[in-house]
């Protein structure tokens, strides 16, 4: 796992062991999530009014249901300020991914977005599955290519072919969409990796169950000490040190998204990782599920293995 050649949170490269598992071939789609909501009446976090006690100091008029939506600026901006392209919009949720008036009509085969960690976890439990650990997710994303840069090899666009839905152009204002998509894409629009899995890279970030830590643990000194089925850091260590007044723990998300570009966030790689607060939902964050030994799943039409 990991990489010593990119962002510091990916280091160090280290060995882990994991038991066998099955993983969804694609991210959970809008159609899948709709089936779940119709069966259970579930209401996502983006559709619920935030609890004021969770957000001390928040302005009362901001405590309304909503989610984060990407909005490109008109021109080049400083890349250290993400507020230049992200907007919290009221009324945004998985059915209205870009605000009131938008819809998911015609997007049944696109990944569901605006799902917080609890939403993804609830879907997984309903389907008789679980969310993957970071180790499981990264192993699956590599598709059998140990140490390769991407899920398909060491070149981003082999032979000029786009292998994933990522950003082409100068992020965040210039989206050339050379891969054919400005936003999300159908979950099978790009080739699968060596394990037959689609969208392990790009399209949408995906939740894992691991609490975020700023670095991996170092490699085990002996083969007998290699961690078995690691579960990441601890909840206390996952809080954002930049927001000490808000104690919202963070999970590891993997895979990058359609907003990852060469000039910003080169995280469209199996080793890449990022922190996301468990209460956060965005227009570029989704999930997929796994099944471990002994778990039972629902039928394929109700969220089973795809």
Image: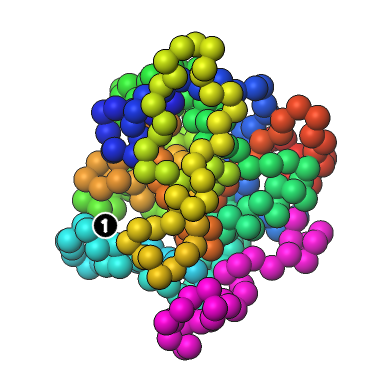
* Lateral position of residue 52 relative to residue 9, left or right: right
* Lateral position of residue 104 relative to residue 145, left or right: right
Q: Which residue corresponds to the image point at 21% horizontal and 51% vertical from the top-left?
A: 170
Q: Quadrant of the C terminus?
A: top right
Give yes or no for residue 51 being in the magenta stretch: yes
Image coordinates for residue 246, horizontal then vertical, percent: 44, 68
Residue under label 1, please give it. Answer: 172
Image coordinates for residue 237, horizontal then vertical, percent: 45, 50
Image coordinates for residue 124, horizontal then vertical, percent: 70, 47
Judging depth in this view, the residue of 88 and 301 nearest the camera is: 88
Q: Which residue corresponds to the image point at 48% horizontal and 76% vertical from the top-left?
A: 55
Q: Which residue corresponds to the image point at 22% horizontal and 68% vertical from the top-left?
A: 74
Judging depth in this view, the residue of 81 and 19 nearest the camera is: 19
Image coordinates for residue 143, horizontal then vertical, percent: 51, 22
Give yes or no for residue 234 being in the magenta stretch: no
What span is colored magenta in the figure? 36-65
Q: Quadrant of the N terminus?
A: top left
Using the image, determine if residue 113 lies above or below residue 212. Answer: below
């Amino acid at each position: 796992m990991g990489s010593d050649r990119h962002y510091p949170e990916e280091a160090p490269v280290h060995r882990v062991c994991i038991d066998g598992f099955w993983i969804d071939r694609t991210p959970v789609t809008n159609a899948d999530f709709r089936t779940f909501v119709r069966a259970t009446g579930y209401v996502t976090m983006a559709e619920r009014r935030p609890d004021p006690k969770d957000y001390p100091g928040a302005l009362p008029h901001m405590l309304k249901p909503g989610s984060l939506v990407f909005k490109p600026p008109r021109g080049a901006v400083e890349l250290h300020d993400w507020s230049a392209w992200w907007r919290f919009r009221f009324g945004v949720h998985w059915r209205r991914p870009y605000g009131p008036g938008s819809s998911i009509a015609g997007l049944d085969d696109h990944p569901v977005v605006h799902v917080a960690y609890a939403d993804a976890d609830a879907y997984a439990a309903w389907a008789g599955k679980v969310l993957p650990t970071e180790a499981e997710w990264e192993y699956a994303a590599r598709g059998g290519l140990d140490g390769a840069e991407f899920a398909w090899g060491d070149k981003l666009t082999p032979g000029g072919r786009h292998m994933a839905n990522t950003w082409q152009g100068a992020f965040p204002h210039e989206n050339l969409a050379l891969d054919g998509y400005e936003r999300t894409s159908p979950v099978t629009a790009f080739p699968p990796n060596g394990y037959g899995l689609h969208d392990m890279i790009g399209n949408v970030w995906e939740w894992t169950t691991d609490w975020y830590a700023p670095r991996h643990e170092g490699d085990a000194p002996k083969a007998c000490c290699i961690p078995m089925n690691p579960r990441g850091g601890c909840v206390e260590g996952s809080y954002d040190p930049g927001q000490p007044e808000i104690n919202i723990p963070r999970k590891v998300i993997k895979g990058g998204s359609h907003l990852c570009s060469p000039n910003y966030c080169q995280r469209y790689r199996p080793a890449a990782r990022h922190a996301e607060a468990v209460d956060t939902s965005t227009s570029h964050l989704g999930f997929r599920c796994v099944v471990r030994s002994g778990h039972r799943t629902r039928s394929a039409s109700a969220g089973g293995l795809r």
